[in-house]
Amino acid sequence: MKCFIHANNIELTKGFRAQIANRVQNAFARVDDKIKFVVISFQDINGLRGGKDKQCKLKVVGEGINNVQIIDAQTTAQAAFSLALSRSKRTFTDRIKRPLRQFRKARSTVRENFEELTAEPA
């Protein structure tokens, strides 16, 4: 899985970039085969005025699954990244599980119908 990190108007240290890549790898380790790449971009929304102005946009591009894009803003880039990562992990894994749940439900309905058809009349 490739991880692209972009920063607009924010300086990211090499250590923080390495930490981002490591945390993304660990967060999506179980579903790594279903992900093409992850794009993380940081932006300082309102410049020097302060407040919750560090925005993290995390986009997960999957194979055969709709993309997940989470945007979060906090006072620090680290906090925004942490929240965006946890939300994107939960959303992406839910999207993977959803078709499986639908398949299991359909399979159980077919099984019930088959049992009704093959039951011997009393």
Image (tube, rainbow, N blue to C red):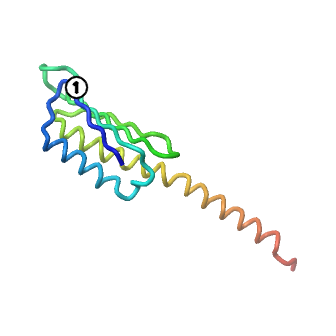
Above-or-below relation of 105 to 3: below
Where is residue 43 shown, x and y percent of the image?
Answer: 23, 27
Residue at 45% across, 51% down: 34
Task: Provide the secondary structure element on which disc 1 rests.
Answer: strand
Which quarter of the picture shows residue 121? Answer: bottom right
Is residue 122 rendered to the left or right of residue 67?
A: right
- Picture quarter with the C terminus: bottom right
Residue at 19% across, 41% down: 17
Where is residue 105 shown, x and y percent of the image?
Answer: 62, 59
Is residue 78 rendered to the left or right of residue 114?
A: left
Residue at 71% across, 67% down: 111
Is residue 83 rendered to the left or right of residue 69?
A: left
- How dense is the environment of label 1, judged by Cα within 10 Å: few (below 14), some, or many (20 and up)? few
Which quarter of the picture shows residue 78? Answer: top left
Amino acid on which the number 1 mark rests in the picture: Asn
Q: Which residue is mark 1?
A: 8
